[in-house]
Amino acid sequence: GESVGLHLPTLSVQEGDNSIINCAYSNSASDYFIWYKQESGKGPQFIIDIRSNMDKRQGQRVTVLLNKTVKHLSLQIAATQPGDSAVYFCAENEGKLIFGQGTELSVKP
Amino acid sequence: GAGVSQSPRYKVAKRGQDVALRCDPISGHVSLFWYQQALGQGPEFLTYFQNEAQLDKSGLPSDRFFAERPEGSVSTLKIQRTQQEDSAVYLCASSLVGRTMRPQHFGDGTRLSIL
């Protein structure tokens, strides 16, 4: 069936380092993906999206890479800050969003 | 406000009671979605509206769950005869047009606890 999953459930990085969060998806027909950040007690916050006709998309301090050959997404956060600490979800948008379990990012000062 | 607004933020009910959760989407957003999020898990789809039409309710777990959006703006998710397994955070999201190729913007959810 359809599923979106993350390789690493937790990630701990030093402030100022770059972070990479990975995600695998199973539906090769998926054509739109979104990364969300969720802080405790809050709803998922949109970070960046990418369509399947792209391999890379950059935002402010964030980059999403899409490898359709191996059905893999990654989110790169440059110069990670304590405020980046949260759970990060990738989601596959097929009308409804299909979320993975999430990766908890912890930033050490 | 500019974002999706949900109320109440917290709801405690006794098993067997009915509850109603409200969502105010971003103004002008045609599409509205409800999701259920269990502790430590990603949100799971419940239902989808385009304007006032409920086009997909495939994620509703039972006939105790009912959602409506009568005027194409505010939506209400109702759960009848609540059970302990209904305890979760219920998230509402809206998007500008259509279901695909558009990011969904979420509210902060209603945390429902069934005693």
Image (spheres, grey):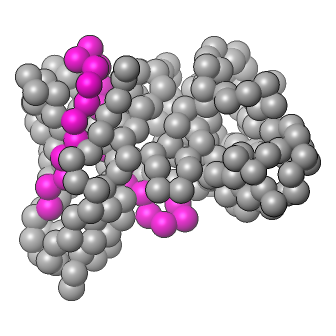
The x, y position of residue A104, in whole percent, is: 32, 62
Q: Quadrant of the C terminus of chain A?
A: bottom left
Give the answer, above or below, for where B55 lies relative to A43. Answer: above
Give the residue drawn at x 28%, y 20%.
Answer: A27
The x, y position of residue A71, in whole percent, is: 16, 27
Position of B110 with respect to A93 (left or right) is right
Decide which of B63, B69 is in the foreground and name it: B63
Residue A99 visible, this angle: yes
Give the residue drawn at x 42%, y 57%.
Answer: A38
Position of A89 with respect to B37 (left or right) is left
Give the answer, above or below, for where A100 lies relative to A31. Answer: below
Identify the image quadrant of residue B67: top right
Query: Residue reaching furthest bottom?
Result: A109
Look at the image and say whether residue A25 sits in the magenta stretch: yes
The x, y position of residue A44, in whole percent, is: 46, 51
Q: Quadrant of the N terminus of chain A?
A: top left
Which residue range is magenta in the image?
A: A19-42
Give the answer, above or below, for where B104 lies relative to A70. Answer: below
Residue B66 visible, this angle: no
Give the answer, above or below, for where B34 lies relative to A18. Answer: above
Give the residue drawn at x 91%, y 48%.
Answer: B17
Decide which of B48, B1 is in the foreground and name it: B48
Look at the image and say whether residue B41 sits in the magenta stretch: no
Give the residue drawn at x 62%, y 36%.
Answer: B34
